Image (cartoon, helix red, strand yellow):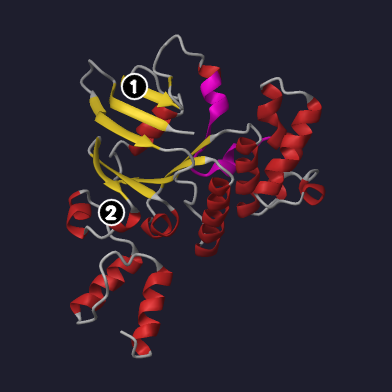
Amino acid sequence: MSIKVEHLSYTYMKGTPFEHKALDDVSFEIKDHEFIGVVGHTGSGKSTLMQIISGLIKGYEGKVYINGVDFSDKKQDKKALRRLVGVVFQYPEYQLFEESVEKDIAYGPLKLGVEQKEIERRVKAAMDLVELDYDLFRDKSPFSLSGGQKRKVAIAGVLAMEPQILIMDEPIAGLDPMGRENFMRLTKSLNECGITILMVSHNMDNLAEYTQKVIVMNNGRLFMEGTPEEIFSDYDKLKQASLELPEVARFAKLLRKNGLNIPEGVIQYEQIKKFLIEKLRGKK
C-alpha cells in the first residue's frame, strides 16, 4: 500500500508564545510493500510525521494520500484509515492490559465489530506471524511473559487488525542486541508478507541492514532521502543533521583512513566481513 505526503506542515500551540513548527513543507512518496527507515535528531519532526500519517494528529497543512485516497480531506472516513494503518509505539508492551494473551490480541478486532469466528482466526494468524505458539500462550497472562514476548503480544494485537501499513516509533528501544536483531528479522518477515513498514529508530545499524530506503528529518524538514547505501555513505551531510554513521560504516571509514581500499557504500556486517575475508585470502 502506497503513501504520498505533499507539502506537509504542522505547528504545535499555534498563536501562543510556545509556538513551535514541527514540520515544514515535507513531501515524499513510499511505494507498495517498501520497508522505510526514518531517522533524525530529537525534535526533528519524525514522530510528528508518523502521527499525522496514522491519523493521530489533525489540523495540519498539506496532503496525505494512502493508496491514492486523500485522508487529509475532512470528509474522508477516518475509521477507514485506522483499518489500513497500524501503529506500534515505543515500549508497546506497556499497553497490555487484558487477563490473557488471547483476549489482549483480540481486543482491537472486537472493538471493530468483527465476528467471533473471524477474531479467532485473526488471533491465531497474528500469533503465528510473531512466532508465539497459540496453544502454549493463549491462556497465559501477558504480564507473566518476558519483555520480548510481551512486545510480540503487543505487535500481534496490532496485526490482528490486519493493517496494510505498519508504523513503528522506536520499537526496538530498550531491547538487548539479540532482542533487537530478532525484532528486525520479525519486521522484515512482516514486510515480506506484503505490509508496508515505516520504522522510526535511532539505531542506524539495524536500519542499514534491513530497510530499503531511509528518510532523514532535520529541524522539521526532509533533509535526505535515498537507499541506506546512499544515506549512510554521506558522513558529512549526516553530521549536519547531528547524526552518526552506523557502526560498520564508521569502521570501514577508519580502515580506509589506514590504507585499506574498502569500497564506499559498505554499511552492513556481511559486506565488511566478506571484504576482510577476501583481503586475508589475498583476493583484494
> Local crowd at mark 1 within 10 Å, few (<14), some, or many (≥20)?
some
Q: Position of residue 100 (x, y in %)?
A: 76, 39
Q: Residue at x 45, y 24 (%)?
A: 55
Query: Which mark, by number, is residue 46?
Result: none
Residue 28 belongs to the span the image colors magenta: no
On the rendered image, what quadrant is the C terminus found in?
A: bottom left
The answer to whether 250 is drawn above or below residue 62 in the figure is: below
Q: Position of residue 177 (x, y in %)?
A: 50, 63
Q: Position of residue 16 (x, y in %)?
A: 23, 17
Question: Which element is circle 1 on?
Answer: strand
- The magenta stretch is 80-101
Residue 100 visible from this viewpoint: no
Q: Residue at x 22, y 38 (%)?
A: 219
Residue at mark 1:
63
Residue at mark 2:
231
Task: Using the rendered view, name the quadrant where residue 50 is placed.
Answer: top left
The answer to whether 122 is drawn above or below residue 177 in the figure is: above
The extreme top residue here reads 75
> Local crowd at mark 2 within 10 Å, few (<14), some, or many (≥20)?
many
Q: Residue at x 45, y 26 (%)?
A: 66
Question: Which element is circle 2 on?
Answer: helix
- In this orientation, which residue lies closer to the viewer: 164 or 104? 164
Question: Horizontally, is 15 left or right of 272 in the view?
Answer: left
Q: Residue at x 36, y 56 (%)?
A: 204
| Upstream in sequence: badge 2 or badge 1 | 1
